[in-house]
Image (tube, rainbow, N blue to C red):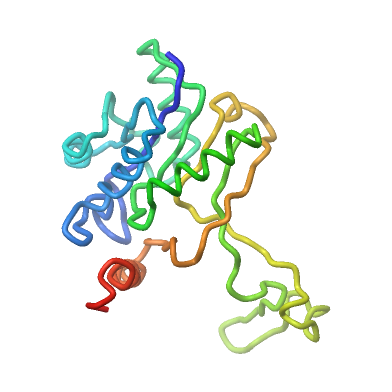
Amino acid sequence: MTGMLAIIPARGGSKRIPYKNIRNFYGQPMIKYAIDAATGSKLFDTIMVSTDDEQIAQIAKQYGAEVPFMRTEKTANDYATTRDVLFEVIGEYKKLNSAFDTLCCIYPCVPFLRSETLIEAHKIFTKKNIDSLMPVVKFSYPIQRALRINDVELLDYVQSEFIESRSQDLEPRYHDVGMFYFYKTDSLFKQNNTIAPFEMKESEIQDIDTEEDWKMAEMKYRILHNPQKA
């Protein structure tokens, strides 16, 4: 089989926000937003969730994702990387005599991800015919003016040569959004991949790693979807 596979990695051992992948976010489990975005895009031949947790697996299947196998202990510990998970998924599908030309890894805590965003990113990924695509967002403040501190005092500028530069004269810098990634499957086994950027707006993203992040995400979601209640 060839085609496109969406992989949603959702282990059960989240430490900072227990069970954040299925915690209720505005009336539905958090992971449902990722599944809905993937389903609504109509890009994928298969949408699967890689998890080590039976409760997450059941909820994922309830909302239309497949869980054809459970994640192993090796890829469910605190030290396993996303790449480890992708390799495992590819290997397990191979055992089932299934293969996919293209993968899209979609993280489970992405309540602001829209199907349209995946469609637009995929168009760029396909047009550029490149190994992978990463969504990025511009730093809101010039990182050339970054400061170093210790426990006692402000130390200095990391790049002191830019102290007198005007903000508008400094080159924009970007960081990984951490929502989804497109890959040509073969590229995962290469040493050096070519990566296309896909720029997103600050309003479309939100890290959710702490309780404070979660509250910020709820606030942002309320403003975007229920502005009269903000």
- Residue 100: x and y in percent read 46, 21
- Which of the image's four quarters has the N terminus? top left
Q: Is the residue 150 above or below the residue 67 in the image?
A: below
Label count reads 0
Q: Quadrant of residue 71?
A: top left
Given the current orientation, which residue lies at the most extreme right position? 161
- Which of the image's four quarters has the C terminus? bottom left
**Residue in the picture at 33% in, 32% down:** 47
Q: Is the residue 227 above or below the residue 27 in the image?
A: below
- Residue 46: x and y in percent read 35, 27
* In the image: residue 176, left or right of residue 143: left
**Residue in the picture at 40% in, 27% down:** 89
Q: Quadrant of residue 37?
A: top left
**Residue in the picture at 16% in, 58% down:** 27
**Residue in the picture at 62% in, 76% down:** 141
Q: Nearer the viewer, residue 218 or 212?
A: 218
